[in-house]
Image (tube, helix red, strand yellow):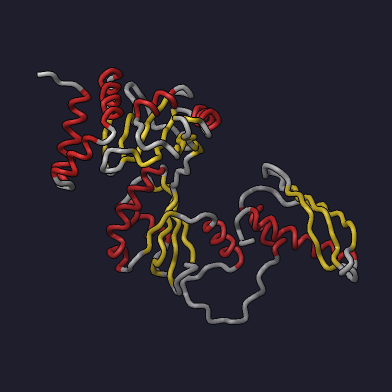
């Protein structure tokens, strides 16, 4: 009796559908008849190239690691996202195309129960260079007549946020608990919750997207058991860590209620930017401001450039302030404040 990878793959897929008992006989017949020629081409490619495809949880994976791979998985920045794929094509058409940009470590195609792809997938290369090359080569590539695919760097999320923790929980104890239930935890940051009174929010950094995904799954299932509270577990939202960090600079967090209402005023934008640059080891901002024309309504236009020594590029632009009756010193300080707030917004520490 002939045995092959193609037959094994088909038998595995058939067993999976039968075990899950997800479809009746009529729907199964329809599924097998759908896109029949392309499925036959896929199976021929599997047999010819000795390919092993594994389908789990709505995605079909090839490699990860590939045969002969030695060492750890490729670093962050090696995965790309592919969308706008025609639903009737499969790995036998997609993988050889993307292999022309470099060696693939893994390819994942998202699948429907009917046997069509869901229009998108992920390719991980062995090097960052090959991933960047694939983006430049194939973004906008016409894979079939009338079908141009989109290709970009994949956002590999490694940070989770847990909201609703008791204020009494300290960072050391929290870290020890999380290390018991999850793996590859690299960093724990603790803040006052911006959403719940007298609760804490923690940002967790894991070593990889896979480790973070597994941790999220575990924490979501057991969140009602964590410290006896209902914890909200989510991927970290864009810029929330920066905003929480700025909040910590403005108002140091204490787990005890604030009873003294006579608090000091918040630092200025200039002071906040100085503190952040100091904390991150970027060096102190150097402001250059040149006042230009005075508008008809008393608005004073100015040009600015701010150099932060260890930041990748200077911040430049134009802005306005009401300046027809300001003394030169006040004009300069107000302009600095406007510029500092703009930079904080651009860096994601405050809203625009």
Instruction: Determine the residue located farthest toward the left in the rendered image.
Output: 1
Front position in the image: 36 or 204: 36
Q: Residue at x 28, y 58 (%)?
A: 221
**Image quarter of the C terminus:** bottom right
Image x and y of residue 260, in percent: 57, 81
Question: Toward which corner of the image does residue 11 lie, by quadrant?
Answer: top left
Count of picture labels: 0
Residue 348 is left or right of residue 74, and the answer is right
Q: Is residue 234 above or below residue 15?
A: below
Q: Residue at x 18, y 25 (%)?
A: 7
Residue 96 is left or right of residue 221, and the answer is right
Image x and y of residue 58, in percent: 29, 43
Q: Residue at x 44, y 63 (%)?
A: 201
Question: Toward which corner of the image does residue 228 lie, by quadrant?
Answer: bottom left
Q: Is residue 339 above or below residue 104?
A: below
Image x and y of residue 248, in percent: 56, 64
Q: Residue at x 45, y 74 (%)?
A: 197
**Image quarter of the N terminus:** top left
Front position in the image: 264 or 226: 226
Question: Toward which corner of the image does residue 115 lie, by quadrant?
Answer: top left
Front position in the image: 230 or 198: 230
Front position in the image: 105 or 169: 105
């Amino acid at each position: 009796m002939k045995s092959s990878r193609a037959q094994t793959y088909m038998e595995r897929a058939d067993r999976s559908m039968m075990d899950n008992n997800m479809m009746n006989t009529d729907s199964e017949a329809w599924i097998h008849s759908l896109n029949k020629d392309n499925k036959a081409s896929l199976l021929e490619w599997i047999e010819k190239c000795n390919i092993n495809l594994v389908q789990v949880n709505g995605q079909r994976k090839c490699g990860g690691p590939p045969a002969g791979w030695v060492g750890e998985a490729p670093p962050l920045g090696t995965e790309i996202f592919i969308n706008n794929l025609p639903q009737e094509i499969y790995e036998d058409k997609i993988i050889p195309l993307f292999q022309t940009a470099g060696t693939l470590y893994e390819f994942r195609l998202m699948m429907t129960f009917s046997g069509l792809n869901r229009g998108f997938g992920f390719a991980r290369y062995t090097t960052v260079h090959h991933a960047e090359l694939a983006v430049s080569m194939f973004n906008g590539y016409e894979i079939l007549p009338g079908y141009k695919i989109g290709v970009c760097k994949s956002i590999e999320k490694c940070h989770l946020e847990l909201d609703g923790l008791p204020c009494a929980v300290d960072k050391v104890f929290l870290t020890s608990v999380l290390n018991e239930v999850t793996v590859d935890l690299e960093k724990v940051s603790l803040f006052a919750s911006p959403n719940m009174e007298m609760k804490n929010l923690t940002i967790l950094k894991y070593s990889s997207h896979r480790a973070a995904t597994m941790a999220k799954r575990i924490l979501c299932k057991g969140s009602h058991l964590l410290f006896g509270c209902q914890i909200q577990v989510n991927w970290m939202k864009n810029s929330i860590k920066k905003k929480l960090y700025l909040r910590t600079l403005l108002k140091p967090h204490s787990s005890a209620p604030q009873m003294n209402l006579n608090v000091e005023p918040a630092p200025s934008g200039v002071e906040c930017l100085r503190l952040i640059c100091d904390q991150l080891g970027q060096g102190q901002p150097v402001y250059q401001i040149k006042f230009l024309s005075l508008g008809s309504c008393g608005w004073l236009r100015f040009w600015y450039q701010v150099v932060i020594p260890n930041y990748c590029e200077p911040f430049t632009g134009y802005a306005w302030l009401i300046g027809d009756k300001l003394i030169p010193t006040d004009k300069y300080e107000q302009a600095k404040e406007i510029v500092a707030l703009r930079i904080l917004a651009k860096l994601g520490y405050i809203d625009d």
